[in-house]
Image (cartoon, helix red, strand yellow):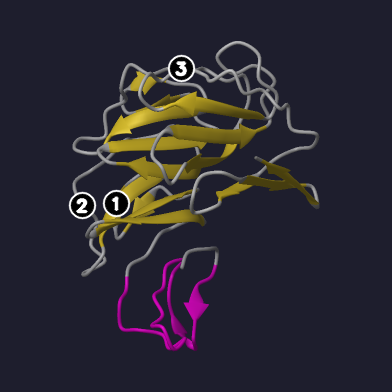
């Protein structure tokens, strides 16, 4: 789990902690010097996104990867120039969203794809005009959905947009979320998308 806490389960834990299936705090320890907004486990690595500039004692701005067993930071570093609030992984592709304008060594506004091996930004550049708050890869691996404050995303998409992962292009789907959106979730079969924000919930099929 990640967040803004500096203690958990009665022990010192700085914004990162691990509990077992029975809800008991484990001995696993790592730390961040700022808010951890999202965690994604991929293989033997635990990826973190947030408002931090240090992860497990190493410089990592906005996003970084930890060894899931030891809690130590890996050498992967994308060096965002501002906060990262959204994170999704598909194979060797790491998708991030937030408030940044530069990440992975390239100019990228609010949304980027990073190489899972070295943290460099790929050529994909959808360039939304405002912050991205949540990203999700469909369970079938075919599409990537992003939600946020934008009104322009790869052309004209308001608050929500879907990309074909095989081409990197926007799909024709254009629902225009009826509210400020900051969270999303897919059904296991990818047939339903849930989008939340401002105390509202929208369901798309």
Q: Is residue 12 above or below residue 134?
A: below
Left or right of 35? Residue 59 is left
Location of residue 180 with respect to 165 vertically, above or below: below
User: Magenta residues, as a range?
Assistant: 5-29
User: Residues at badges 2 and 1 in contact (C-beta under 8 Å)?
Assistant: yes
In percent of the image, x 29 and y 51: which residue is there? 65
Instruction: Find residue 99 and report its horizontal and vertical position in percent.
Output: 55, 33
Instruction: Measure how far apart labels 3 and 1 are at the Cα level.
Output: 27 Å
Q: Give the labeled residue for mark 2.
A: 74
Circle 3/circle 1 CB separation < 8 Å: no
| Chief secondary structure of the magenta portion | loop
Residue at the spot of label 1: 65
Q: Rounded to the nearest whole Å, what is the CA distance between mark 2 and mark 1?
A: 6 Å
Residue 200 rendering spot, x and y as whole percentages: 80, 49
Q: Is disc 3 placed on a helix, strand or loop? A: loop
The residue sitting at 44% across, 89% down in the picture is: 22
The answer to whether residue 61 shows anywhere in this view is: no
Which is more foreground, mark 2 or mark 3? 3
Depth check, front residue: 155 or 142: 142
- Residue 187 is tagged as none
Lower sequence index among marks 2 and 3: 2
Q: Position of residue 8 (x, y in %)?
A: 49, 80
Tag 2 secondary structure: loop
- In the drawing, what numbered circle is on residue 169? 3
**Foreground of the two, 186 or 16:** 186
Q: In the image, is residue 48 above or below residue 144?
A: below
Image quadrant assignment for residue 45: bottom left
Q: Is residue 40 rendered magenta in the image?
A: no
At x 29% / y 59%, what residue is drawn? Answer: 57
Residues at badges 2 and 3 in contact (C-beta under 8 Å)? no
User: Which quadrant does the C terminus fall into?
Assistant: top right
């Amino acid at each position: 789990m990640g967040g803004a806490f500096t203690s958990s389960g009665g022990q010192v834990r700085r914004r990162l902690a691990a509990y077992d299936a029975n809800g008991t705090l484990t001995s696993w320890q790592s730390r961040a010097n700022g808010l951890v907004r999202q965690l994604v486990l991929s293989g033997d690595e635990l990826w973190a996104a947030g408002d931090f500039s240090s992860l497990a004692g190493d410089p990592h701005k906005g996003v970084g990867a930890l060894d899931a067993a030891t809690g130590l930071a890996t050498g992967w570093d994308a060096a965002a120039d501002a906060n990262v609030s959204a994170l999704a992984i598909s194979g060797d592709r790491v998708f991030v969203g937030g408030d940044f304008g530069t990440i992975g060594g390239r100019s990228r506004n609010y949304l980027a794809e990073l190489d899972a091996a070295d943290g460099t930004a790929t050529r994909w550049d959808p360039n939304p005009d405002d912050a991205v708050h949540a990203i999700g890869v469909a369970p079938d691996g075919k599409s990537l959905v992003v939600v946020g404050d934008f009104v322009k995303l790869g052309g004209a998409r308001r608050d929500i947009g879907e990309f074909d992962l095989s081409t990197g292009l926007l799909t024709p789907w254009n629902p225009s979320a009826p509210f400020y959106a900051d969270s999303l979730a897919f059904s296991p079969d990818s047939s339903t998308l849930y989008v939340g924000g401002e105390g509202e919930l929208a369901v798309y099929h």
